[in-house]
Image (tube, rainbow, N blue to C red):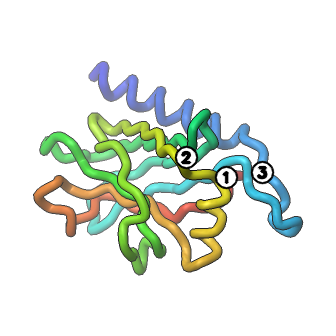
Amino acid sequence: MRKLIWLIVIVLVVIGIYKWTAKNDDTTGTVAESFAATMNPVANSGVTGTATIEEGTGGLVVSIALAGALPEIGNHPAHVHMGTCTAPGNVKFALTDVVDGISRTEVTGMTLQDITDGIANGGLSVNVHMSADDLGNYLACGNIEDAP
């Protein structure tokens, strides 16, 4: 019960943080200050949540907070894929596995411009997989967009 309460608190904090994050006007050609993905369930998994991408000190920081019926399998691999949830492509970069609904990854050498370029060239999506042995089975997916 305690983990569930903490998970709910973390999800609410993540949602609050990305709603507070300012967004640049896309019509000016500038790069957004952050990106977000609303994580939707895949194949009736019941898993939902959010993913945020922000500038860190040495690259990007990607945070995922999930809720719902996460299987008790343990770690759930996560990746940023080229393409959208309806047509995911190759992995652009791997993320830290989701454990107890939470993942935080520091991606060195990448910038928000790389995310902007990926969105403009066919889209980017965050995918959370069932397990390392079952990467073809997705639990949740979200298309990356400018954070509101």
Label located before the other in sequence (2 or 3): 3
Marks 2 and 1 close (CB-CB < 8 Å): yes
For marks 2 and 1, the one nearer the N-term is 2
Instruction: Give me the disc on residue 147.
Output: 1
Question: Which image quarter: residue 81?
Answer: bottom left
Q: Name the residue under label 3.
A: 23
Q: Distance between the residues labelled 2 and 3?
A: 13 Å
Mark 1 burial class by Cα count in 10 Å: few <14, some 14-19, many 20+ = many
As shown in the figure, which amino acid type bears the numbered disc 1? Ala
- Outermost residue on the right side: it is 28
Using the rendered view, name the quadrant where residue 141 is placed: bottom left
Count the labels in the image.
3
Question: Disc 1 vs disc 3: Cβ atoms closer than 8 Å?
Answer: yes
Q: Label 2 neighbourhood size at 10 Å, few (<14), some (14-19), many (20+)?
A: many
Question: Where does residue 59 sit, x and y in percent of width and height?
Answer: 57, 43
Instruction: Classify mark 3: residues with Cα within 10 Å, few (<14), some (14-19) or many (20+).
Output: some
Q: Residue at x 24, y 48 (%)?
A: 76
- Quadrant where the image shows the N terminus: top left
Amino acid type, callout 2: Thr
- Identify which amino acid the numbered label 3 is placed on: Lys
For label 2, the residue is 52
| First along the sequence among labels 1 and 3 | 3
Q: How far apart are marks 2 and 1 (CA)?
A: 8 Å
